[in-house]
Image (cartoon, rainbow, N blue to C red):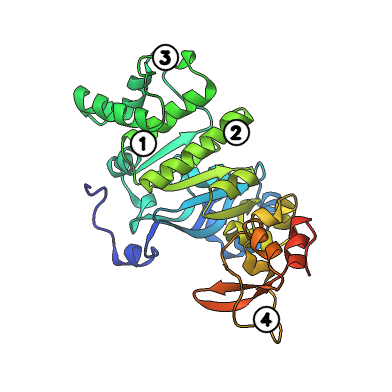
Amino acid sequence: MSTIAPAESAIERDSASEGADFSIRNLWKVFGSEAAKIAADDSMAELSAADILEKTGCVAAVRNVSFDVGRGEVFVIMGLSGSGKSTLVRCFTRLIEPTAGEVLMEGRNVLSLGTKDLRDVRRRKVSMVFQHFGLLPFRSVIDNVSFGLEIRGIGKAARRARAHEVIELVGLHGYEERFPDQLSGGMQQRVGLARALASDPDVLLFDEPFSALDPLIRRDMQAEVIRLHRDMGKTMVFVTHDLNEALKLGDRILIMGHGELVQIGTGDELVGAPANDYVADFVSDVSRAQVLTVKWVVQPVPDGLAGDGPSVPSDMVIIDAIPTVLASPIPVRVVDNGTVIGVIDRDAVLREVAGVKSF
């Protein structure tokens, strides 16, 4: 793949985490006349967004945020409306210009790229799928899908061949010559997804792409994203306000509130150990047994338990362990990397199924 920026400095290279497609460092996006001063003032990091607004009249939409997105990971950013999640993901490729901080991709600071190199990142390295499909109404499906390749100067035969490949991939074979207004909402979103895939980017950014779809179509599109990730292994960053969608799609989930990173972790970590009341409220309606793994309800091995008997791996979801636990007359061992770390019994499992928290 062609180089997209001049050789990075040693500082830029070293500050990116190994194996990360994106490393976000101390990122700020402030709207207002004093934006740069606020981001440069260390004392502002200690204030809430409301305090900053009252003190300066500026809106801190993203406030001193740092995290990594691993290569090949499905990373979900979620939060309530106004939490800063969409602003944050648009800062990745400077669709919204950050006020301060670093956005490192392959060790290069995207914020330091010139116009040509930034354009190359957007065309070749990162593609984005939006809630509003943004299809060109007077172009056919295949011409919409191949549009980005046309902008890059790819010849007609080559770009149409690539468009046919991704149209097949997203299940739109036979619709190549249809126009957007002849398609359902779900099919239009598939066209948008195919357009994003056509340039074979390293990273796909999704900004609430399914929130306008009917529930059944939304479920189908979620399954489509899971299938595409399994087949292609692309790094995906997915913005949503729907926790069930986040739990279904995400390897890890970042929860934002008032422009801040509140908690980051796997689904079972957020449900099993919420960082504060804000996160606890988010996960309060989740079926714990369908999210938590058995390691969250493990108990010490009781004295006198025989050396044999049934066991389950520590990363098994509780609901999947129910048949083994209910069929066993003795507590079931929980095994982590060949080592027994404890046991679970039917009482512990049924408490989680019933939604009763153990303290």
Secondary-structure class at tag 4: loop
The residue shown at (34%, 46%) is: 202
User: Which dot, 4 or 3, sits closer to the camera?
Assistant: 4
Identify the residue under disc 2: 211
Residue at horizontal 29 percent and vertical 66 percent from the top? 10
Q: Nearer the viewer, mark 4 or mark 2?
A: 4
- Whether residue 155 is visible to the viewer of this picture, yes or no, is no
Q: Residue 135: which quarter of the image? A: top left
Q: Nearer the viewer, residue 117 or 313?
A: 313
Q: Residues within 10 Å of mark 4 (few under 14, many from 20)?
A: some
Q: Position of residue 2 (x, y in %)?
A: 21, 47
> Given the image, on which type of amino acid does mark 3 rest?
Phe
Neighbour class for label 2 at 10 Å: few (<14), some, many (≥20)? Answer: some
Horizontal side, residue 37 vs residue 229: left or right: right
Q: Provide the residue designation for mark 4.
A: 301
At label 4, the amino acid type is: Val
Judged from the image, the secondary structure of the residue bearing numbered disc 2 is loop
CA gap, disc 3 to disc 2?
22 Å
Left or right: 287 in relation to 174: right
Q: Position of residue 1 (x, y in %)?
A: 22, 47
Q: Please, what is the three-letter code of the amino acid marked with disc 2?
A: Ser
Which residue does the numbered mark 3 point to in the structure image?
179
- Tag 1: amino acid: Leu
**Which comes before the other along the chain, label 4 or label 2?**
2
Labels 3 & 1 near each other (Cβ < 8 A): no
Q: Which mark, residue 197? A: 1
Cα distance, mark 4 to mark 2?
46 Å
Q: Earlier in the sequence, mark 4 or mark 3?
A: 3
Q: Quadrant of the C terminus?
A: bottom right
The answer to whether the residue labelled 3 contacts the one labelled 2, judged by CB atoms less than 8 Å apart, is no
Q: Are marks 4 and 3 in contact (CB under 8 Å)?
A: no
Whole-angstrom CA distance, mark 4 to mark 1, is 50 Å
